[in-house]
Amino acid sequence: MRLAKRYREMRPPEMVRMFQTIERMEGVLNLSIGEPDFDTEPDIVEAAAKAGYDGFTHYPPLQGFLDVREAVCRYWERHHGLRADPGEVYMAVGGIQVAHLAFAALLDPGDEVLLVEPYFPPYVSQVEANGGVPVAVPTREENGFAPTVEDLKRAVTSRTRGLLLNSPCNPSGRVVPRRQLEEIAEFVGEHDLFVLSDEIYESLVFHGEHVCLATFPGMRERTVTMAGLSKSHCMTGWRLGYGIAPEALARTMTVIASSQTYGLNSLAQKAALYALDTQDAKVLERRAIFAERVASVAERLNAMKGVRCPPADGAFYLFPNISGSGLSSEDFSWRLLEEAKVATVPGSPFGRSGKGYIRIACTQSQDTLMRAMDAIEKFIDTL
Ligand code: PLP
C-alpha cells in the first residue's frame, strides 16, 4: 500500500531504534526505560475493577468525569498551591496527548515554539505536525541545564508564540529554581507567549521544591500545566494524563480530541480518582527510593575515567557527560549496548546540548543499577 508522501521518508527516531534493538537482545541491563519499575498499587487496580462492576463501562464525558477533574484540582492545590476549577482540566490519553492538543489548539502555520534543550524528543515532531516551527534553546551544564532569560532572548523572534518548559526535566534531572522561573514568567509576559509547562515529574523532586509556573501572577491565563499519573503513581500503562489550562482552551482541546480519542478510558479515570486522593505516602516513599538510587549511581559515574555526572535534583534520570571517553554520545551508547549489554540513551536526540552526554534512567533495582555500573566501568577501561 502506498504511504502518504509526508511519511515515506520517515525513519524511526534514534530512541525508538535503540528500544527495538534492546527488545531483540537477551540479558540486557536496561537503563533506558523512562518509567518507574514499580507496579501500580493493588488498591488502585481494585478501584478500577470496582468502577467496572459499578457500570463505568460506557463512553466517558469528553473532557473527563467531573469527579476525576475535581480530584486533579485537589491534588494540585494540596501539593503545589495551584487553585484550578474542574472546567480548566482536560483528562487526556497520557501527558503526551495534552501537548499535542495544546499545540493543535494554539499554533498557526509558521508559529515558532521555543524548546528548551535538552528536551523530550517527541515535542519536535508534535510542533511540526501542528504547523509550527520548533526552535531549540541550547542550555549548559554549568547552569544545571536550566534556561536563563539570556538563553531565551537569543532565540525569541517576532514569530515566537510559545515556550515549552519541562521541570523536573527528562533527561537532565534539572529542577528550575523559583527565582529563575520568576524571571522566565516575566519574559513570557513581555513577549506575550503561551507556555506548555511539562510538570509530569512534579512528585519527584529530591532537592529544592517543585514550583508550578501557573501559580505566578499573570501566568494562569497563558499556561497549560501538563502532568499525569504515569510517573507519580506508576501508571504508565493506564495512559492517564491531564492538562490544566484556561477554560476556553480546555474546551477547544476537548473538541479537537473528540475526533481522535473520544475521551479517556472510563476505568482508568476512576482509578485516577482513587489514586490522586489516597497515595501521598506511597508517592513520598518512592521518591525517597529514587533519590537514593540517583545519588548512588551519580557517585559511581563520577568515579569513572572520563565521566562527569552532574547531580540530578528531580525525576529519575542522570545525564552524565561522557565526552572524556573520546566517543560521541551515539557511539558510546551503541557500543555500551553491544559490548557490555547495558542499555542507555544517547544524549543527541534531546537536542544539540545533549551531545557528549548519555541518559541513564534509574528505574531498576539498586542491585541491577550497581551491576550496570560495574559493566560501564569495565567497558570504559577497554576504550
Ligand atoms: N513529558 C516527559 C518529559 C516525559 O518524560 C514523558 C514520558 O516519558 C511524558 C511527557 C509523557 O508521559 P505520559 O504520556 O506517559 O503521561
Image (spheres, rainbow, N blue to C red):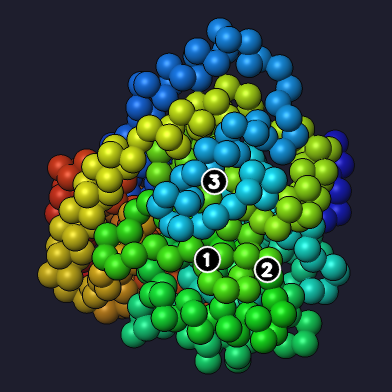
* Three-letter residue code for mark 2: Arg
The percent coordinates of residue 220 (x first, y second) are 63, 65
Residue flagged by tag 3: what amino acid is it? Cys
Q: Which residue is mark 2?
A: 222
- Image coordinates of residue 172 in percent, x first then y, are 39, 67
Circle 3 sits on which residue?
A: 73
Q: Based on the displayed image, in which of its 4 quarters is residue 69 positioned?
A: top right
Q: Is residue 154 above or below residue 219?
A: below
Q: Is residue 152 left or right of residue 204?
A: right
Q: Which residue is mark 1?
A: 215
Q: The residue under label 1 is which amino acid type?
A: Thr
Q: Residue at x 70, y 58 (%)?
A: 246
- The outermost residue toward the top is 53
Q: Earlier in the sequence, mark 1 or mark 2?
A: 1
- Ligand 1 within 8 Å, label 3 CB: no
How many residues crowd around disc 1 within 10 Å: few (fewer than 14), some, or many (20 or more)? some
Q: Residue at x 43, y 35 (%)?
A: 277
Mark 3 or 2, nearer chain start: 3
Residue pictured at 73% horizontal, 22% vertical: 59
Mark nearest the camera among 3 and 2 is 3
**Mark 2 residue crowding within 10 angstroms, few (<14) / some (14–19) / many (20+):** many
Distance between mark 3 and mark 2 Cα atoms: 18 Å
Residue 167 appears in which quarter of the rendering?
bottom left
Viewer-nearest residue: 42 or 251: 251
Left or right position of 81 against 5: left
Badge 3 vs badge 2, beta-carbon distance below 8 Å: no
